[in-house]
Amino acid sequence: MDRPEYDRIPETALDWQHAGDGAAIATVVETWGSAPRPVGSQLAVSGKGEMMGSVSGGCVEGAVVEEAHAALVDGTPRLLTFGVSDEEAFAVGLACGGTIRVLVEPVGAALPEAMLADIVAGREGRVPVAYIVDLETWARRLAPRDGTFAERFRSDKSGIEGAEFVHIHNPPLRMIIVGAVHIAQPLVHMARACGYDPLIVDPREAFASESRFPGEVITHDWPDEAIAAVGLDQRTAVVTLTHDPKLDDPAIQAALRSEVFYLGCLGSTRTHAKRVARLTEAGFTEAEIARIHAPVGLDIGAKSPGEIAVSVMAQVTSVLRRG
């Protein structure tokens, strides 16, 4: 997946550093409730004056860039606090003013280059990692998903804990869509727009064709083979749309044995009852089967493929953000 600019900050900063240009990373560590950029948002600045990302939507960017250039010169990190007036906040689409705190770290002099490389490697390998910096002592460390920050990883929420800022680096979101049916066409576009890396799985080449899904990643392997090839994790959603047990069931069983955060299956209540019977016979427990969202999507009275896709994407988002 080609990540959006705001999600390529660590990789870009590391490239600038390796090229000898120098790089500083500014990260939002605290902000007001209606901020245009959430905690964890980043802005990278190179020694050549290149920029990528955003920390405020415009109202404090200029000052942050100046501080980033200063940090590249003196090698010292800094924690900046900006009071944003009602007028400034309104200009960037906020309901009211407030306070934003931004951590600026020059790569190498403050944020170790090797540590940044480990973060980038984890992101590329779909290995969750937390970057923790003590805002008083400037001590830094990396932490795995399991343990103290497990809930932050699950909710994908960076933030301050005591004197430390915890920055969560989760793998990109993925959506595996089993069944290249008419609903999959609007759903794949919505998933991509919401930041997911979609994969369409359907051995029926007439359905899963380039002409029906231009530019999308398609596999004609059987679902169990396709899923085994890409793997499943906590940042993956699986949606089955075929109604055909030969196609849906292998994907459902693989998802139930994994840590996927969402599993939704198309079909009526009657269809799902038959699905439950098959899964029970296959040895799955009632609690495991209860993980399935079926009929798939929020009940919004959807009828057309586009409306059903909206209901699915809304439910996926709700499960991801609200747990």
Image (cartoon, rainbow, N blue to C red):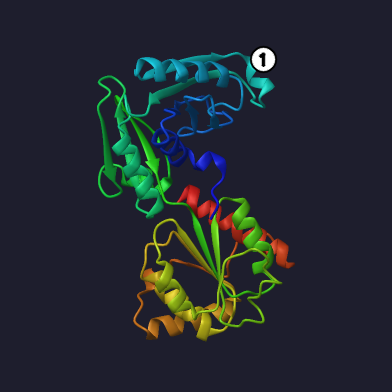
Q: Residue 218 occupies which quadrant of the picture? A: bottom right
View extreme (front): residue: 20
Q: In the rendering, at what x and y percent does residue 301 appear?
A: 70, 63
Quarter of the image for residue 267 reads bottom right
| Residue 257 against residue 13 in the figure, above or below | below
Q: Please say whether residue 299 is visible from this viewpoint.
A: no
Whether residue 68 sits left or right of residue 112 in the image: it is: right
Between 80 and 83, the one nearer to me in the picture:
80
Relative to 257, residue 276 above or below: below
Coordinates of residue 314 in the picture (x, y in percent): 60, 55
Judging by the rendered image, the residue that carries numbered circle 1 is: 87
Secondary structure found at label 1:
helix
Q: Horizontal placement of 104 versus 310: left or right?
A: left
Write the residue at 44% across / 85% down: 278
- Which quarter of the picture shows residue 5? top right
In this view, 72 is above or below 308? above
What residue type is disc 1 on?
Glu
Would you say residue 246 is visible in this rendering?
yes
Q: Position of residue 239 (x, y in %)?
A: 54, 68
Viewer-side residue, 195 vs 239: 195
